[in-house]
Amino acid sequence: MLIIPAIDLKDGQCVRLRQGLMDDSTVFSDDPVAMAKRWVAAGCRRLHLVDLNG
């Protein structure tokens, strides 16, 4: 099984949307590069990046 972590970006921050609503998001980090580095340090070789501002 291949698990690929996802980082959702909104206004330059790492977020998770509640029920897919753009107006209802939780911010997990304001530094996407640091978040990506954490995943890489944990052994991930791939990341799925989603720009919600498109």
Image (cartoon, helix red, strand yellow):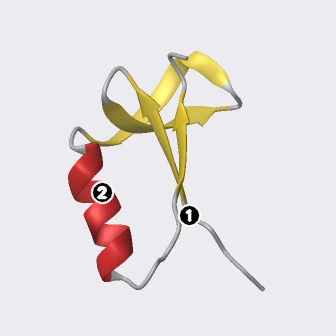
Foreground residue among 28 and 32: 32
Residue 19 location (% of width, % of height): 71, 31
Foreground residue among 15 and 45: 45
Q: For residue 12, which quarter of the picture?
A: top left
Give the residue displayed 44% in from the left and 33% down from the top. 9
Residue 44 location (% of width, % of height): 47, 77
Residue 45 location (% of width, % of height): 48, 76
Check the image and name the residue furthest to the right. 1
Question: Rounded to the nearest whole Å, what is the CA distance between mark 2 and mark 1?
Answer: 11 Å
Instruction: Check residue 17 in the rendering and tell me which mark sits there, or answer none.
Output: none
Callout 2: SS: helix
Mark 2 Cα-neighbour bin, 10 Å: few <14, some 14–19, many ≥20: some
Instruction: Check residue 35 in the rendering and tell me which mark sits there, or answer none.
Output: 2
Residue 53 location (% of width, % of height): 50, 16
Q: Quadrant of the N terminus?
A: bottom right
Give the residue displayed 57% in from the left and 17% down from the top. 22
Mark 2 and mark 1 in contact? Answer it, CB < 8 Å: no
Whether 41 is drawn above or below 38: the answer is below
Of callouts 2 and 1, the N-terminal one: 1
Q: How many marks?
A: 2
Whether 45 is drawn above or below 51: the answer is below
Whether 53 is drawn above or below 14: the answer is above
Question: As drawn, is 48 to the left or to the right of 41?
Answer: right
Residue type marked 1: Pro
Mark 1 Cα-neighbour bin, 10 Å: few <14, some 14–19, many ≥20: some
Callout 1: SS: loop
Give the residue displayed 41% in from the left and 85% down from the top. 43
Residue type marked 2: Met
Residue under label 1, please give it: 5
Q: Quadrant of the C terminus?
A: top right
